[in-house]
Amino acid sequence: MHLKLIYPKWEKLKGQTTFNLPPHGPVAFAATLPEYVTISFTDENVEAVDFDDDCDLVAISMMLSTQVKRGWAIAEEFRKRGKKVLFGGIATMLHAEETLNHADAVFLGEAEGRMEQVINDWRKGSLKKVYNYMTQQPSIDLVGPARRDLYKRELYNHKGVQMVDLFHASRGCRFSCYPCAVAYLGGRAFRPRPLDKVIEEMATIDNNRLFIVDNSLAQDKKWEIELFKELIPFKKKWISHTIEDDPAVLDLAAQAGAWYVYQAVYDTSDYIKERIKRYHDYGIGVEGTILLGLDNQTEDDVKRLIDFLLEIDLDLAEFTVMTPFPHTKGYDDLLRQGRIFDFDWNHYNAGQVVFHPKQMTAERLQELYDYAWETFYRQESQEARMFRLFCNVAIREMNEGTYRPRNRELANKSFGKEIKNKPLTR
């Protein structure tokens, strides 16, 4: 049988550098399908969906709330043509009840070890409306290498530079942050993959640059240390979320190829300032993630925070507004208090205010969000700062003999002069 796998497009935030990363969810799902299933993959962010393509079953993988309405529209077009449509992915789990109205079947939870049954049900004409495994996580040992062979590599580059591949070494999160849905989606238990499985998948990845998408690597120090030790021989350069704030761990992370990390900046404390400095001391860049619109934030607090960011030598900053995604405590609280005024999921992109803040008007929070982006990038644009980070990693790769852009001619034209003019030091 032939399955058509689709990742719906979404509207990017205005004013930010636009590029498309190869999505991880769909190819991780594809790895769970029986071997007799052939797969064609369309990422609608980089190519159009062919609604007349011959296939037996359509699967739509949605990660973001801003994808769900487009996903529903795609499903309706295929169902008009007599095709059965299966939905899955993070956003499907967050918007399951509405998605049921547009689906022949909805899969909730992690797919490892479960898809043979789903395909068999389809073959027998007895596809269930809901496959709910939300509270029954499969063994983490079942997670195998993602089907990266499904990517059309030429579609994932920015100015001739290949985008990072996404990869995960664990699932679940023992933290339960206020605006986050991870505890609902993947459970509160930290579930690291066996290191031999991590190494097995790493060996299949041709790309020299990765984004390790784990919710946080700072959940089990012993495992984290062993992970970094195992990564060192691969000479990959990678991005991740938070790393343990420990000199020994940071040193290993740097040896293992840590390029830059996402670090939440939630106040103007010396702790945050020193934390950023420690990353930099080990040659690791930092992209600060800053959430605006929490109930304890005043307008003056936001302005002070933005001034602070300019003082602590962040490489990049990513501003978001508090967004009440379904199945989070933030959503439950704001819904109960009657403070959510916009339920258009296209607007749930972390850049548009959809609720009434406690300390200011929604309009003022939206203005402060725009002010934050404009102020931080006033002296040096987001693209210029990203370019500087790329130059840093390219220099490291050239020293190690691993620098290999996919489109060398275009990359050299865009970046070559700047790289050649920089000292090649570690």
Image: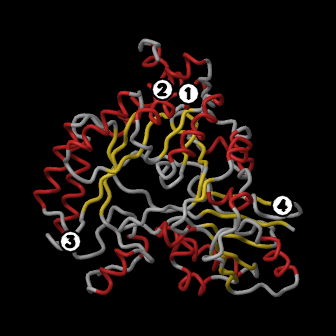
Instruction: Look at mark 2 in the image and give the residue it sits on.
Output: 414
Q: Residue furthest left?
A: 300
According to the image, label 1 marks what residue?
A: 410
Residue behind mark 3: 362
- Measure the alpha-carbon separation of dots 4 and 2: 38 Å
What residue type is disc 3 on? Ala
Q: Where is residue 313 in the image (x, y as percent from the top left)?
A: 26, 34
Task: Report crowding for label 3: few under 14, some 14 to 19, many 20 or more residues within 10 A (C-alpha).
Answer: some
Mark 1: few/some/many CA within 10 Å (<14, 14-19, 20+): some
Of circles 3 and 2, which is in front?
3
Percent from the top left, x then y, of residue 7?
A: 61, 62
Q: Nearer the viewer, mark 4 or mark 1?
A: 4
Q: What amino acid is labelled 1 in the image?
A: Leu
- Name the side, left or right, on which 312 lies relative to 31: left
**Residue assigned mark 4:** 38
CA–CA distance between discs 4 and 3? 48 Å
Q: Where is residue 419 in the image (x, y as percent from the top left)?
A: 46, 18
Q: Measuring 47% from the left and 36% from the top, which residue is drawn there?
A: 249
* 1 and 2 marks in contact (CB < 8 Å): yes
Answer with mark 3 or mark 2, whichever residue precedes in sequence: 3
